[in-house]
Each structure stands twice: as C-alpha cells, then as structure tokens.
Image: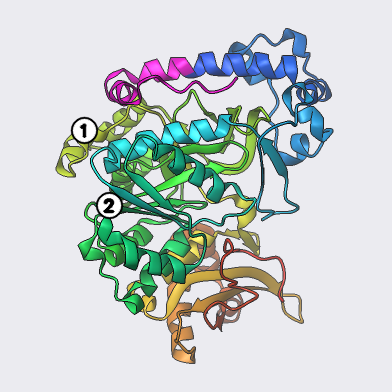
Amino acid sequence: MIFRYPPDINERLRELKTKPAEYWENLSIRYVDKLIKFTIEFTPAYRKFLKDNGVDYKKIKGFKDLEKLPIMDKNSYLRQYPYQELFPNKNLNLKTISATSGSTGEPFYFIRGENLDEQGLYVLELAFLNQWEIKRFNTLIVLGFGLGIWIGGLHNYYVYYRLSDKYKITTAPVGTSKELILKTIKKLHQFYDQLILVGYPPFIKDVGDEAKNYDINFKKMRLRILNAAEGFSEEFRNYIAKIYNLENIVNDNINIYGTVELGTMAHETAFSNLIRRIAVEKDKVFRAIFPEANRIPTLAQYHPYIVYFEEKEGLVIASGYGESIPLIRYSFPDRGGVIKFDEMIKKLKSAGVDIFKEAEKWKIKSKILKLPFVYVYERSDFAVSLVGILIYPEYIKNALIKKELQKYLTGKFSMLVDYDKNMNQKLKIHIELKKGVRGNEEIKDKIHREIVRALLKNSTEYNHLYSTASEKHRKRLEPEIILHTYEDPFYFKPGIKQKWTIKKEK
C-alpha cells in the first residue's frame, strides 16, 4: 500500500490539467479497492471491527462493497481495539511518532512510516510548482508550526527538506516564536526571490500585525502564505492579503485540510478560492454549491487516489492508508460534502457563472487542476450550545475581524456556555487584546454589538429566538465579553493551538 511517487512530477502536473476529471476518479476506485482488500487481509483490528458490526469480512470483495462497510471514528475503532492490532501485520517498527493535539480528549499516538510523508511531498510539490512557481524562484520557507510530536511541524519540515534536493529552497524551521520569525524574515528575505510563510492562521495574523514593530515592509517581497489546522473566512483572507501586501488574493494564500490520521488530505487552490469568493459575493452561487449550508465552509481540492472522500448524512468521511494505520470510512467528525469537478462546473453554470472566464480575469486559468472538491465546516464538537442553538467559533471570528475592532484585538478568543446562580445559560467570550492595548467599556460595547450582529446574521435559530424574546430574555441571549491582556497565560498562552471553545472557567 506504499504510495508510488510519479517518475516525472512535471508530466503529472500537465496531466492533472489536461486529462478528464473522470480519469482521476477511476484511479480512486482502484485505490480504494486495494485499500479494502489489504486492510482486511493484514489488519486484525479491522476484521474484529467488521465482525462486531455484523459484517462478514470474507464476503467483502472491494470497492463495490464500500457502502456495506461501517463508519468508524477514534472511539469506535482506534481506541476500541488492542493498539498493535491496528497496524498491518502488527508492525510497530516504523520511523516516526505523531500524536493528536488532544483538543477533545487524550492524545492518540500514531507510529508512522514513510507513506504519509511521501504523499505530503507529492501534494505540496504539485501545489508549489503550480501556484508559486518554485522552479523559477530562489525560495526561503519560514516554518511557523510547533516542532514537537504534533504532525504539522516535522512533516512540513521533511517535505521542504526533500524539495530542496530539486529546487532552490531553503527552510528556516523557526517554530512558534513570533519574534524569531520576524527577525528571520528581516535578516534573510533580501537574499531570496520568494518567501513562503507557513503556519496556523491566527499565528500568521499575529506575525503580520507585529511586523511594523520590526520595520518590515512586505511590499518589497514576493510573499506567499501556507496555512493549516483550521479554516477561516474570506474577511480573514482579505485582512491577511492587506497586511502582507499579497499580489493575488486567490492565489497567494492557501489553506491545507489535514489531520494527523491521514496527513495532507486536501488543500485550497487558486481555483477553489475563486469559487468560494464568488459564492460569498453571490447568494445564488452559494445556494447552488452549498444548498444545505448556513455558513461558508472551507473549499479545497484533493487527490482521490490518495484520500477518498464520501459524504454521509452531512458528514465528510475519508478512506486512506495515511499513517500506517489504514482507515476506511473514517469520521473526524467534520460536516461538509464532496463535489466532483465536472459537477462543480455545472453547478456554477446553472447559477450563471462562467468560471473559466472568471479564472482568466484572475490570471489563474492555466493553474486549474481537474480534481474533485471537498468542503468542510468547523467541527460540531467545537461549537457550544446556548439554549439548544449551536454557536460556532466562525460566527465570532467573523465579528472580531471587522475593521472597527482590528486596532484593538488579535482576533483570538475562547468561548463557553456557563450558568448563573439561577441556572440560566450565558454565553461567555474571553477575548485577547493586542499588545499594549488596555481594555475599557467602550471597546467591550463595540465588540458586543458586532458579535450580536454576527449571531443574528449567521444563525437563523438565534435570530428567531432573539427577535421574538422579551427584553429580559434578550439580555440572557447576549454574550458576556471578558477582555484579557495580550498572551494571557490561561486563555491565550503563546506557542500552542488556540482553543476557541472551552468546557469550564479557570
């Protein structure tokens, strides 16, 4: 099941642009067929899992029986069976250990071989060649992911280290020190034609906000940004483009959809970013592409012969070999869906959009890859429930990115639903102030107004309840704002992934 790297990556890039979309979809069927047969034959835990779910594994012949296979997740599969039995042939003699962040519980440890890194190398090399022309430019990559047991930092470093064998690429594996990243950029950018800044979106924003304190002028650089770990809004993309002076907003900032389980599963492309941008601007397009949605998801393209996505009851589920623990119909759980390439073109056309003409206007037509799309929202278990209404972090993010608030806030927050002495629920939002900013009631009032507006706009349930409530009950539905100084050690500890939702107060 080890991934086979193509002999000529440039020829593969040409094929991804010229071969029909159906060709890549057919490759995915062969891949999943082999994955199912391999996993049943060599993985003891999977055979037990099928038996426990009433499936006779001897009757499963491959892809044609995919729908008969049960959906798995971390609790029903990875934590349910003896650890060693999750690995084909019970082989734990592999090269690297990665772990989940433990955002929703205890970390889970993956012992992995070369397969996932080879897949990541393939996907990112194609992306960098296609969008950022690494063959033409002498490139400095500044890596801002944590360099620990989490997959992001070391996996990315491996990819860039390998790319440096073929292209003029130098990597600075700085980690999560904003100060060191800015000092590195200031000192070294002048020696390179192109700078690629890699990191977690809120961290990338912090770096850009603080650049002025280091007398860094991004206008003098050919700068590109690679994000991962969470989605963001088009308002956020606009803000990043402004502070970093990006040339082409749909091309120069892309986001990876990845997990420790299956690595780099999909990523934004210039084409998917253009489609999403149009969908945000035109409601008819939004409804054509995301008919069940009430908020904008991340839209990415993926190689279906590396990770195979399905949509099941509003959830995106994935199959792949990834981390040396083969996973079939695995739920993360991420809400969203899958759209084939040709289907996407038809949906856009039905909404009155000639997407190829639009791509020409944005100078990205030559960069279109005929790969399918996956769209994902923030996970439902990362939301909080206020009187039965799910409040998603992205609602609050959209409020805090407003221009009026940008001079005060970093954009980071943690929210929870707590109870008062009468056991009434209350939405509390802890918010980080920018460095040197002191909080006051005026700032609180401005934040309060923007968040209420965002909730009314984004949640029809909240809007209905708020609009029909008495003044007394409206107050209960409105958020309580708590301001914190920059890098508060409990809510906004530097160097770690931001927890947008928390279970309880300090």
Look at the numbered disc 1 and give the secondary structure of its residue. helix
| Residue 43 image-quadrant placement | top right
- Identify whether 235 is placed above or below 69: below
Location of mark 2 (residue): 194
The percent position of residue 400, horizontal first and vertical second, equals 43, 71
Q: Verify whether residue 128 appears in magenta.
A: no
- Identify whether 334 is placed above or below 449: above
Q: Main secondary structure of the magenta part?
A: helix
The percent position of residue 251, horizontal first and vertical second, equals 28, 46
Q: Residue 366's mark?
A: 1
The earlier-in-sequence mark between 2 and 1 is 2
Residue at left offset 63%, top offset 61%: 384
Quadrant of the frame with the C terminus: bottom right
| Residue 198 image-quadrant placement | bottom left
The percent position of residue 264, horizontal first and vertical second, equals 50, 39
The percent position of residue 209, horizontal first and vertical second, equals 37, 72
Q: Is residue 301 visible?
A: no
Count neighbours of disc 1 (C-alpha within 10 A) and say few if under 14, some if 14 to 19, many if 20 or more: few
Q: Residue 51's mark?
A: none
Could you say which is closer to the camera, residue 97 or residue 247?
97
Q: CA distance from mark 2 to mark 1?
A: 21 Å
Could you say which is closer to the camera, residue 469 or residue 148?
148
Q: Amino acid at mark 1?
A: Ser
Count neighbours of disc 2 (C-alpha within 10 A) and say few if under 14, some if 14 to 19, many if 20 or more: many
Look at the numbered disc 2 and give the secondary structure of its residue. strand
